[in-house]
C-alpha cells in the first residue's frame, strides 16, 4: 500500500532531495501536498510531475496571481495549511517540513494533527517553538523524527535507550571553509568564500552558519530539547571529513558512532520508510578508508567566538527566539555586504547582552503570535542599530 506524503518547502534543496527519492520509488509513496513561499514555477512543475492534488503558496501575491494556472490543471491551490484541511481531512504517513527558518514553525503546528509522523529539517522552528510542537505531537499521538544528519544519527543510536544511561554526546562539525585559515585573514572575508562549504552543498544561510559554527550551536540547543538532555552532556568536535555524524558515550563504557556519506538523502529516506520496508541507498558502501587516521579537533573559541553563546541558559524563553532572529538578520546583512564577517559575530555577541533583550530571557512566549512579535521586534532593533 502506497504511503501518503506531505512535503512542506518542496522547492528548496531538502524538498527536491525528498522528491528525487520518491521519484525512484513511486510504488511505495504518493505525494499529496506540496508547498512553497514564492517559487511558483518549480512548484507547478513538481505538482504536475507527481500528480499532486493540493499545493500551498504562502506568498499572498503569488497565490492570487497563480490560482487560475493551477486550477486549469485541476490542482487545488491554497494560501495556508489550515485552508487545505478545511476541505480534505486526509492524513499522511509522514509530513516532511523542509521550510527554512522560523517560518517553518506555524505550518508544522497546523499539520501535526493530519500526520502520523512529522519529520523536521528545520533547526529554527525546533529551537524557538519546541514546547508548542511537543504539546501538539503528544496530543495527536504523532511520531517525531529529526532530519538534520546529526540529530537523525542521535535519534537512530538512542532507540530503546534511556537517558540515564548516556554519559556524553558528541556532535561533529566540519569546521567550515576557514578551518585552516588564520583569523586575521578572514575578518573581512568576502561572503562568496564563506559560502564554499568543503563537504556539503547547502543554501546560503546555512552555509554562513556553518562557517561561523552557529549551525552547531543551534544543533546543541536543538538536541537538548529533542532528547531532553543537559547542555553539559553535549560537546562539539570538529571532524573535517564529515563522515561521522554523532558519537554517543554511555555510562557502561560502550561508545556508539554513526557514519554515512555527506548526503541528506540518507537521513531523509531512512525516515520515510516504515519499519516493514527496507531502503536500499545507492551509496550504501562503508568507506572505511575515510576513517583511516581520523583527526578530531576541539574548536578554537578565538576562531569561532560564537561558541560563547552556549554559556547562556536555554529554557524555552524568548532567549532562543532572540538568538535565532539576531542571527537571521545579521547573516542577511553580511550576505548583502553591509557588515563584515567579523562584525557578524561581534555584533551578535554584543546585542545578546543588551538590556533591551536580556529583560526577556526569563519570560516564555505564550503562543506563536508572541514568537512572531519578538521576531519583528528584533529585526527593527537590528536595522536601527546598524543604521547608527
Image (tube, rainbow, N blue to C red):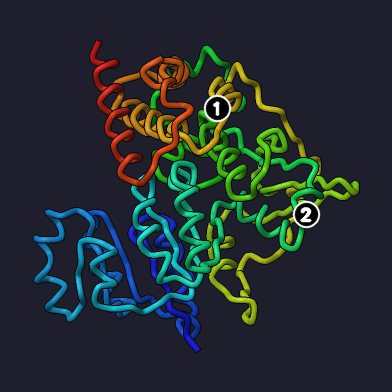
Would you place residue 191 above or below residue 74 in this image?
above
Instruction: Give x and y (percent) for residue 227.
Output: 64, 50
Q: Is residue 159 left or right of residue 86?
A: right
- Quadrant (top left/top right/bottom left/bottom right) for the C terminus: top left
Q: Secondary structure at mark 1?
A: loop
**At x 76% / y 36%, what residue is drawn?**
295
User: Which residue lies most toward the bottom here?
Assistant: 1
Q: Secondary structure at mark 2?
A: helix
Left or right relative to 227: residue 113: left
Query: How far, Cα to Cα, is label 2 from label 1?
Result: 26 Å
The quadrant holding residue 297 is top right
Residue 30 picture location, percent across and down: 41, 80
**Residue at image location 30% in from the left, 22% down from the top:** 382
Residues at marks 2 and 1 touching, judged by CB atoms closer than 8 Å: no
**Toward the viewer: 233 or 174?**
233
In percent of width and height, residue 46 lies at: 30, 70
Q: Earlier in the sequence, mark 2 or mark 1?
A: 1
Kindly identify the residue that appears in the image at 73 percent across and 60 percent down: 286
Sort mark 2 into few (<14), some (14-19) or many (20+) by Cα contacts within 10 Å.
few
Foreground: 381 or 55? 381
Of residues 201 and 115, the one drawn nearer to the viewer in this rendering:
115
* Mark number, residue 178: 1
Q: Quarter of the image holding residue 60?
A: bottom left
Residue at 58% x, 20% y: name it. 303
- One can see residue 71 in this view: yes
The residue to which callout 2 is attached is 288
State the mark number for residue 152: none
Residue in the foreground of this view, choosing between 97 and 203: 97
State the image quarter where residue 334 is shown: top left
Q: Is residue 354 above or below residue 369?
A: above
Dot 1: within a 10 Å radius of its alpha carbon, few (fewer than 14), some, or many (20 or more) residues? Answer: many
Image spot of residue 344 (x, y percent) = 41, 21
Amino acid at each position: 500500500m502506497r504511503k501518503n506524503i506531505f512535503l512542506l518547502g518542496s522547492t528548496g534543496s531538502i524538498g527536491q532531495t525528498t522528491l528525487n527519492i520518491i521519484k525512484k520509488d513511486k510504488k511505495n509513496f504518493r505525494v499529496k501536498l506540496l508547498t512553497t513561499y514564492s517559487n511558483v514555477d518549480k512548484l507547478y512543475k513538481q505538482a504536475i510531475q507527481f500528480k499532486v492534488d493540493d499545493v500551498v503558496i504562502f506568498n499572498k501575491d503569488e497565490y492570487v496571481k497563480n490560482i487560475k494556472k493551477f486550477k486549469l490543471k485541476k490542482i487545488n491551490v491554497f494560501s495556508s495549511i489550515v485552508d487545505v484541511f478545511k476541505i480534505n481531512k486526509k492524513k499522511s504517513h509522514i509530513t516532511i517540513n523542509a521550510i527554512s527558518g522560523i517560518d517553518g514553525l506555524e505550518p508544522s503546528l497546523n499539520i501535526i494533527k493530519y500526520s502520523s509522523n512529522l519529520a523536521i529539517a528545520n533547526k529554527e522552528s525546533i529551537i524557538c517553538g519546541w514546547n508548542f510542537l511537543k504539546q501538539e505531537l503528544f496530543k495527536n499521538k504523532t511520531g517525531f523524527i529529526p532530519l538534520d544528519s546529526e540529530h537523525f544519527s542521535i535519534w537512530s543510536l538512542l532507540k530503546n535507550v534511556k537517558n540515564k544511561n548516556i554519559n556524553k554526546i558528541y556532535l561533529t562539525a566540519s569546521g567550515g571553509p576557514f578551518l585552516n585559515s588564520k583569523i586575521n585573514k578572514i575578518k573581512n572575508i568576502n561572503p562568496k568564500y564563506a559560502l564554499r562549504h568543503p563537504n556539503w552543498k547547502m543554501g546560503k544561510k546555512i552555509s554562513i552558519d556553518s562557517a561561523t559554527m552557529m549551525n552547531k550551536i543551534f544543533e546543541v540547543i536543538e538536541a537538548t530539547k529533542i532528547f531532553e538532555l543537559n547542555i553539559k552532556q553535549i560537546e562539539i568536535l570538529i571532524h573535517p571529513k564529515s563522515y561521522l555524524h554523532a558519537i554517543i558515550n554511555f555510562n557502561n563504557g560502550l561508545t556508539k558512532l554513526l557514519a554515512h556519506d555527506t548526503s541528506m538523502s540518507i537521513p531523509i529516506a531512512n525516515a520515510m520508510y516504515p519499519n516493514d520496508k527496507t531502503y536500499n541507498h545507492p551509496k550504501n558502501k562503508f568507506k572505511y578508508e575515510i576513517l583511516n587516521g581520523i583527526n578530531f579537533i576541539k574548536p578554537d573559541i578565538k576562531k569561532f567566538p560564537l561558541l560563547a553563546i552556549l554559556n547562556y541558559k536555554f529554557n524555552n524563553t524568548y532567549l532562543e527566539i532572540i538568538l535565532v532572529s539576531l542571527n537571521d538578520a545579521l547573516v542577511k546583512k553580511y550576505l548583502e555586504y553591509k557588515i563584515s564577517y567579523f562584525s557578524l559575530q561581534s555584533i551578535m555577541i554584543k546585542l545578546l547582552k543588551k538590556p533591551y533583550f536580556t529583560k526577556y530571557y526569563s519570560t516564555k512566549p505564550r503562543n506563536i503570535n508572541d514568537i512572531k512579535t519578538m521576531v519583528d521586534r528584533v529585526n527593527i532593533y537590528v536595522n536601527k542599530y546598524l543604521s547608527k
